[in-house]
Amino acid sequence: MGAKDRTTTIKLDPFAREWLKALAKARHRSVHALMKEAIDHYLARQAGDGFAYQMEQLKGKPLEARYRVAVTQSRPRTVGLPVHVKEQIAAGNNRVRVLRGWRGLTVAAVAARLADLGSGASQRELEEIEDDRRTPGPGLLGAIATALDVTVDDLLE
């Protein structure tokens, strides 16, 4: 670890800790590597595709340069659902489909995010959920919420 690197501690509930350990073992990776990757993915999603590319180009550069890019490229997280999304849901459209469309994601992109999260949901299963032919269980519901960067309540209300 370099002189400028610092350790950050995160407290996880026992279930999340065990799930993370199992996922790391299944993927033949360390828990540390999975957590770093998850944070990198989250930050890139928050800032957009250009951010991830810029940060990759800045690896090894001074922390101040990376910080400037992060601050200028990041966008604030949306609080609550926009009115037009709520109207689509109120009109009877499938919540997962509406939220996926709002995020600008394809079914394949959501399936890829779910795979990154360790969910076994396939693209076909997502299509069945969006067509109201399948109801996701609590675990899959939480994973879908994470993949869409919304709350579980946004998927249920």
Image: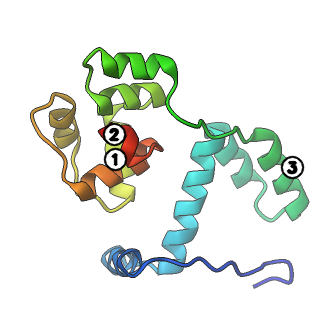
- The relative height of residue 21 versus residue 43 in the rendered view (above or below) is below
- The relative height of residue 67 versus residue 54 in the rendered view (above or below) is below
Callout 1 amino acid: Ile
Q: Position of residue 124 (x, y in %)?
A: 17, 39
Q: Are marks 1 and 2 in contact (CB under 8 Å)?
A: yes
Q: Secondary structure at mark 3?
A: helix
The residue nearer to you, when weighing 10 against 101, is 10
Residue 102 lies in what quarter of the image?
top left
Q: Are marks 2 and 3 in contact (CB under 8 Å)?
A: no
| 68 to the left or right of 143 | right
Task: Tell me the number on the disc at residue 155.
Answer: 2
Residue count near mark 1 (Cα–Cα under 10 Å), binned few <14, some 14–19, many ≥20: many
Task: Tell me the number on the disc at residue 98.
Answer: none
Residue count near mark 3 (Cα–Cα under 10 Å), binned few <14, some 14–19, many ≥20: few
| 20 to the left or right of 129 | right
Callout 3 amino acid: Arg
CA gap, disc 1 and disc 3: 32 Å
Task: Tell me the number on the disc at residue 68.
Answer: 3
CA gap, disc 1 and disc 2: 9 Å
Q: Position of residue 131 (x, y in %)?
A: 16, 27
The residue nearer to you, when weighing 147 against 145, is 145
- The relative height of residue 86 versus residue 111 in the rendered view (above or below) is above
Q: Which residue is mark 1?
A: 144
- The relative height of residue 130 versus residue 24 in the rendered view (above or below) is above
Q: What quarter of the picture does the C terminus occupy?
A: top left
Callout 2 amino acid: Leu
Q: Secondary structure at mark 1?
A: helix
> Which residue lies at the image location 33% right of the left edge and 54% below the top edge?
142
Q: Position of residue 126 (x, y in %)?
A: 22, 39
Q: Tag 3 or tag 2, which sits nearer the N-term?
A: 3
